[in-house]
Structure formats: structure tokens, C-alpha cells
Amino acid sequence: MTFTGSNVRNNRVAVVAAGVVSPLGFGLPETLASLQAAKDCITPVARFSVAQCRCKTAGQVADERLLEDLPNAKYGHQLHRASHMLIRALQEALAHDQQFKPEFAVIGTTSGGMSFGEDYYRSLHRHETLRNMPGWIANYPPQKPVVDALDLFGIRSGCQVIANACASGTNAIGHAFECVRSGRYQRMLTGGYDALSELVFVGFDSLQASTPEKCRPFDRDRTGMVLGEGAAILALEELGSACARGAHVLAEITGYGISTDNHHLTQPDPSGVGARAAMEQALRRANLEASAVDYINAHGTATPFNDAAEAKAISDLFGSGVPISSTKSMMGHSLGAAGAIEAIFCLLALQQQFLPANINFRACDEDIDLNIVANEPHSAPIRTVVSNSFGFGGTNASIVIQQTPE
Amino acid sequence: MSLCIAGLGWVTSLGSGVPEVWERLMAGEEASAERVSDSIGQKPYPVFRVPSTALQNLPAHPRLRRASAISRFAAAAGLAALHDSGSTFDDQGVKRITLVFAIANGGVIYTKRFYHDIVAAGAGAASPLLFPETVFNAAASHLAAIIGVTGASYTLVGDGAVGLSAIRMAEDLLSNDEIDYCLVVGAEEADWLLCDAYRRWRLLRSTPPIEPFHNPAKGTILSEGAGAVLLGRNGSIRIEKTHPGTYYATRREAGERLRQILEELGAGRSTTVISGANGTFIDLAEVYSISKVVPSATVYTPKPSLGEGVGAGSIWQVIIGAQALRTQQLPPLLHAPANLPFQIPTSFAASGDVIILSCGLNQQVAGLRLSN
């Protein structure tokens, strides 16, 4: 017996709604204002002790705002703050398009409700018996915030939760894009989330991947990343279906590439081969030449290895002219949320025709030949953008987002 | 749209090798439990461990030198599934394989060790060697490196239903003609910490056996290992239909969600259901849904023999369903009550379909239908 996928369609895939919570703000308007102001949203870590860490800062979402005017009071305070972030992002997206009825959800994360796991372990270690242990355990798994958010808004669809480390958010968008493009689904929710946790923060610190200084992607004197947190949701729909019901199309996703770089569990191949393969595949799926790209939202963690490999891959493929920035310089690296949040930055850049800034940039690295959007955003005519995310495990993901012709 | 099973592999508490473990299941064997304890708690718990002999054929690889148990289980099962397909994969062939990994708890042993050092001695004691192995996709990364996969590799996280969700994702991926095969691997490693969590969640039993379908539920026993299914477009066993899955908001809803899945999968009168019943509340949800939709079904659960393997569990169910179709036999259902509203295995009808049903303990439900 034989099954072939030869009837696969190449549907166009529209983004019809979006929602975001990040250190840059709650919702698209606040986020846009922060991006246009090139706001540095990195602050001292307050959630746990960082006294023994090299890095002491992160991009953080304010709890008091997360818990303001909860969409449903019964959900109250028992849920993880990651759930609250995802709920806020989904609430905004569904408010943009109240007719959107998703068939399926694909969401990225790296650590779910990790801080509940930490609370549980600390209590065990102290031999405490706490009544809320079962609640921590039940709300710790990575799928729980997704189910919480879907359930709150009465969406009964299934969901897949991708945990491909720091590429998770872009992988989720990319897989959802492919599912709509192939005709397997018409409407999907996608995005990513992650909340700051001590285990992950200390982990990156132990690797000396995070910095005690400012986060300076692609700078000669870069010394590492800072972590961030947040959530973002994108509603994807087959373009014809979206137009037929009069949905407002924010942009189109036109390409996705994924590759696996087997060089090392935590370090990219220095040649940039994995990153380049993902970008090439995304361009090929979009039927685009590299010269058509107007802006690249880089993964740009500001670690010496990542930025060097990514810069090599970009300059080999695109040359040194295309404007590039890492918006992680403003809000930190939100891991599984990063790709989704950065996709929303790209949507805003396309809508408002500007290039988001790579802040804290001081000096060019002589080994990096890129056109960095240094420190200030610029107005620019842009129609096509690429957003990159690369992660531990050698996962590389790139998507192409384009302005939809009127 | 359907897809086919091209190869199978597993590592279980009854050993490895699909024919070998199948023989033991057919003989009504169940794994023996080992009691595990930990310095942070006084209470020991029973666990069905993978015997060391199950990994004796795992080739040495630099990626596995420091890797956790879950990575070794996954590598052994994944390589066995590739071998079982009878195909050889050269560099070009490997480029057309994607990897979908399914896990629930991931590398819990290293995660606990890493965080224990932070709690006990502060952040300055954290090990940079352990941290990378705590990341959910570490096991998938190791397996990709061992096989040489350079294309897509996804790690899905979820509850016991995640394995079926991974097969659904594989079906989505195989709609792309650039991909020939998708290797789906579900894996889990057991640790005292998980047992403690499940006990506080009121899901664990203090001693074996696992007694499925009892009311009230008596609890489950955790196990570890991996299952791997190589999916492609040719093979003797066909996956007729996958369900995208859904979730239950409350435990009371679980039966209704499973009923919905069974109806949408198109269960026939001669259906066999490979159930995920594990001695917890999900058993009654399965009894409800099966008795509503396919009361004539023959139902088998492997959990009394293999334990609750969570991320690996539903892939084991798929392997058992495929073996049932291959051999036209089903193992005996162990420790079930006598008065069930459906058939328990005696003989297996040659014309029947097999439905794999999975109700996870943390709200996710999924199913698929196999035939030959």
C-alpha cells in the first residue's frame, strides 16, 4: 500500500490577528511604542536571588499588570504566570478577530511552569508538607498554560507544544504555517511563551552564556545574553478564507525553514551551516531570492559563538547590505517565546515601515560584516522580512513574513 | 489521508526487541518493580525499571557519554526502528528523514541533580555540564546526531497522549514530498521525584500490580523506556486515521472527550482498542467511552505489564497495535475485573481495525486507527 502526499496545496497563509505580552509592553500598541522608542527594558532580577550569579538582570513582565482584570476570576491566582501571559496574548488576538475559530494550536515553549517545579522541589528539600503541592504539580507541565488559555476562551481544539529550545516559537509558527499551506488546516493558533525561572536563569549563567553587562548583539565587545520572558500569539488562516469573511490581514507568512546542526548540544557550527540552511529553505519555500529581503530580525543572542555563526551565515547568503537587528537587546531572550514575539515585531515593522533597533551597540566587530540597525530605529520601505531563531540541540528555524499586496 | 508503519523499536521494563517483549506479553508476564528512594524524602516508591541488558546492543557514540537515561533509551529504540524497516539510509536518505520526539517529563534525573545543587549550595554550585541535558530537546538532539538527521527535528511535550500527537505531527510533515520517513520516538526516564509528584497528585499505587478498570481506581506504577515508530508511505500496517486530539477541562469530562474521539475515528464493530488504562481515573473514562461507542470491542491495556511510561506509553500502545495486526493475536489482559462492559482478549479477529486510545493524566486526549 502506498500513501503519497502529492496532492499537497500551496495555500497562501495570512496572519489575521496577533497578541503579545513582553517586557516591552502589553499588547501591540504598547509594544510598538517601545520599539519605536528603542526602549531598554532590562531590569534587575527580583523574582529569585541572583547574588551568586554573574548576570543579575533580565527582561521581566510585571506581575501586577498580569493579574489586573483577569478575563475570568475563577482562574484567579492558582495558575502559573506563564498561563497568565499566554491568556493575555490570546485575549488580544481574539479581540482583534472575534470571528476567528481555530481548528488547532501549535505553541512553543522551553520550560512551561518551571517555577512551580522549583517551588515543589524546595519544599521537599526543606521537608515541608504544603497544601499547594498538588497544584504546583498539576500546573507545572508545559502544555498546561496552553490548555488554560484555550479553555478560558472556549476553544476546544487540540494542541501541540513544541519544545525545541530557543527555536521553539519560530518552529511553532513555521509548522502551523506549513499545516495551513498544505491545506491540512484552514485556521490555526500559533505562538510561544516562557516565564523567567531560577533553574533556567542559573543554567545559562553557569554556562557563562549570560552577561553581567549590557546585552550587545553583534558588537565587538559583546559578552553574552540576558534572559527575558513573555508570550505571543498569531492567528493564521488560509488567505482566501480570510478574505472571504472580510478578515483584516496583517501580513502573510510565505516561507519556513528548519535545520538541525549536529555540531554540539549547546554551540552552533561556527561555519553557520545550520543557520544558513534554515534561511535558504525559508527563502526557497517563499520563492524568493535573498536580494528580496528588506530586513532580518536576527536571533542575535549576543553570545560570542551565536552571533559569529549567525553573522557568517547571513553575510554568506545575503551579503552585507540588508539591515539587521537583534531586538533581544531591548527585552532579553525570552527563549520559547522569542520567535513568536519577534514575529510580532516584524509584523509591526511591516505595518509601520520601520526597522527596529539593535540597542547598546558601540563598536563593529571586524569579523562581522553586517548592516546593523544600531541604537535607533529607522524608517524604511520594507516588504519582506526574515526572522531567525536558533537553539540548543542544534535546532535552526527561519520564517519569511511579507506585506500583503492591497 | 493515511500513512504506514515501516519499522518498530522499543526499550521497556520487559526488555528490548519487539518480538522478544511481545512474546513475554503474550505469556502474561509483567515487569518486576524496584523500590527507589531519595535523600530528600523518606518514602520509597515502586518503579518498573529498564533492565541493563535492554541496552546492551546500543552502539557507543560520543553524544551518549554524558547523556541521561532517557537519551539512551531513545537512541536504542530509534535505531531499532530504523533497523526493523530493513532499509539502509545513506547520506542522501538520512536527509529525507525527520524526527519527532514525544516526552512528558524529559531528563528529570539530571534536572533534579542540577537544581538540587542550586538549592543545597547556591547558584555558584550549578553545573554547566548538567544544564544542557536538562533541556527538553536534548534527547532528540543526541538521536539526530547519532543518525545524522540534518533536517527537521521536533520535540513535543505533553502528557501520556503526547506520543499520538507526535504521530499526528508526523502525518502533517509527511504531506511534504521532500520527506520520505518520519521517525517518531516517545521516551521517559523514571525517578523518585516523579513518583513523589504522582503520589501527591493521588495517582500512584504503593505496590504493584496495576489493576486496570477497577472502580474505585487503585493507582498506577511509573515505568521508563522508549518506543519508536518509523513512518513512511509504504508498509504492511497502515495508520488509517489520526485524530488531532483535544483536552478535558475537568476529569468528569474525560469520558466525553474520548467518546468524541472514538466516534470521529470511525470505530467498527470488530474493533480492538489498545487502551491506555493504567489504574487511575482515566480507566473509567475509557470504560465510559468504549461502552458508549464500541461495546463489542475487544480491549487490551499493556500498562499492568509495562507500567505507566507516560511519554513512551502511547508509542508502546501503537507498537502493540501493530503487532496485534501482524500476528493476529493479543496478549491477555491482566488484573482486570470480571464485569467489564466490553470484551477482553481471547482471540483476535483477522478483519478488525485497531484503535489506539490515549487519555493523559494532565488533560490531553488523542487517538488513531490502524489496519493492515
Image: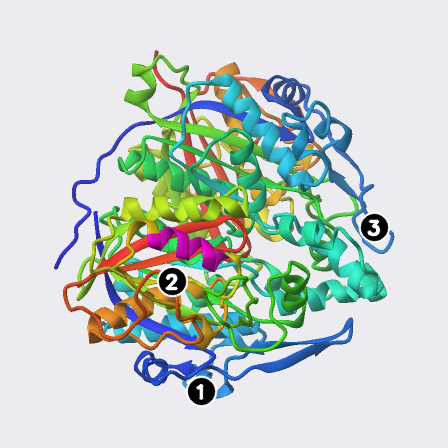
Q: In this view of the protein, which residue sits in the foreground, A314 or B46? A: B46
Q: Amino acid at mark 2?
A: Ser
The residue labelled by disc 2 is B275
Apparent side of residue A200 relative to residue A284 in the rendered image (left or right): right
Chain letter behind tag 1 = B
Boundaries of the magenta span: B282-291
Q: Quadrant of the C terminus of chain B?
A: bottom left
The answer to which of A98 and A274 lies nearer the viewer is: A98
Disc 1 secondary structure class: loop
What subunit carries mark 3? A
> Within the image, what quadrant is residue B109 found in?
bottom right
Alpha carbon distance from label 3 to label 2: 47 Å
Chief SS of the magenta region:
helix
Q: Which SS class for mark 3? A: loop
Q: Are marks 1 and 3 in contact (CB under 8 Å)?
A: no
Which residue is label 3 attached to?
Answer: A50
Cα distance, mark 1 to mark 2?
30 Å
Using the image as rendered, state which of residue B135 and residue A343 is in the foreground: B135
Does the magenta-highlighted stretch encompass residue B157? no
